[in-house]
Amino acid sequence: MDRSQSACHWLTNRRCGWQERRPQTPYAQAIDSPSGILEWTAQDMKQLAPDLWQTSRRQLLDGVYSHAYLLAQPQGNLLIYSLGEDQQDDLDAIEQLGGVAMQVLSHRDETGPALCQIRDRFSSRLAYHEADAHAISDVAEADLFLDPAGTDPLLEEIEVLHTPGHTPGSVSLRYESPHGKSYLFTGDTIVPNSGGWATGVYPEIEGDAPSLVESLTHLRDQAADLIISSAYGGESGVVEITPDEWRDAVDQRITSLRKRFDV
C-alpha cells in the first residue's frame, strides 16, 4: 500500500473552540434488547457487534479507505479513529446511538476538520498520544494524552498499547467486549490490504522501521477475534482471525520489514 501522500494533506488551520461539556445521552438501547441488535437502520452505518458500529467508507487515496468505529459503553461511547468533514449522515446516526463521550485517535494521520465538528457537536473529549501532539494540536488540542498506565474512567476497560513505528505516537487499543468477542484496533500499525497485510514506514510522518518491528513483536501476542485498522486496502478494514493466523500475519510483516530496512 503506497501511503507516500500522507493523510496529513487534509489539515486545516482551524482550531477547535472550547465549550462547556454537557452530559452524554445513554448509549444505544441495543445493549438492553434481547437480541442485542438495534431495530432501526442508520444510513451508511453498519453494526458489527452489539456494542460496535462502523461509519461509512471514506476514501483517503486511490485504493486506500478508512472508517471510524463507535464503541458503546455504559460510562460513555468512544469514537475510535475519525471521519471526513462531509460525513454528516454518520454524525446524525452517532447522535441517535448516544453521541460521543471521547474520540480516540490512533495516530496523526487521523487529524482533520472533523475533529472540531465532533467536539463541537457532542462536547466530547479528544485523546491521542503525546508523541504525535506536535502534528495534531494546531488543529485540535488533546483533552487527554493516551498512556498505557492511564486511569481515565472512559478507558478503564480499554488496554492502551503504545505501538510506535508508523508514527512516533501510534497506539493500538484492545478491548474484551462483554458480548463475547475481543477487538484489537491497530490504527495504521498493521492493516488489511486486499487479502493480505501491510505496514508502512514513511519519513514525512516520522516513521521508524526498528520501532515498528518492536511494536509488531508486541502485537503478535495481542490476538483478538476482530482486527480493526484505521486505513486499509481492498474490501474491508475489519478481519475476523484466529490467534495462529494473526501471529503468522504479524510474523510475515516483521520479516518483510527486517529485509527491506535491514533491521
Image (spheres, rainbow, N blue to C red):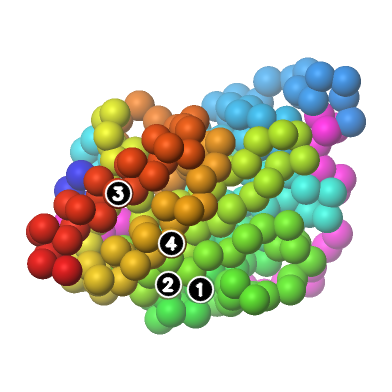
Q: Residue at x 44, y 56 (%)?
A: 219
Counting the numbered discs, the total is 4
The magenta stretch spans which residues?
Answer: 4-31
The relative height of residue 153 versus residue 186 in the rendered view (above or below) is: below
Identify which amino acid the numbered label 4 is placed on: His
- Is the C-beta separation of discs 1 and 3 under 8 Å? no
Q: Residue at x 76, y 23 (%)?
A: 37
Decide if residue 74 is in sight here. Answer: yes
- Look at the image and say whether residue 17 sits in the magenta stretch: yes
Q: Residues within 10 Å of mark 2 (few under 14, many from 20)?
A: many
* Sequence-earlier tag: 3 or 4: 4
x, y (%) of residue 12? Answer: 38, 66
Instruction: Name the residue that disc number 1 marks.
Output: 129
Question: Label 2 vs label 1: CA separation?
Answer: 5 Å
Instruction: Name the residue that disc number 4 marks.
Output: 218
Instruction: Name the residue that disc number 3 marks.
Output: 251
* The N terminus lies in quadrant: top left
Q: Considering depth in this image, is 176 or 103 the residue closer to the camera? A: 176
Identify which amino acid the numbered label 2 is placed on: Gly
Q: Is 102 positioned to the left or the right of 14 in the image?
A: right
Question: Label 1 vs label 4: CA separation?
Answer: 18 Å
Q: Secondary structure at mark 2?
A: loop
- Is the C-beta separation of discs 1 and 4 under 8 Å? no
Instruction: Name the residue that disc number 2 marks.
Output: 169
Q: Residue at x 83, y 63 (%)?
A: 22
Q: Is 26 positioned to the left or the right of 217 in the image?
A: right
Identify which amino acid the numbered label 1 is placed on: His
- Look at the image and say whether residue 158 sits in the magenta stretch: no
Question: Label 2 vs label 4: CA separation?
Answer: 16 Å
Viewer-side label of 1, 3: 3
The relative height of residue 88 versus residue 190 in the rendered view (above or below) is: above
* Sequence-earlier tag: 1 or 4: 1
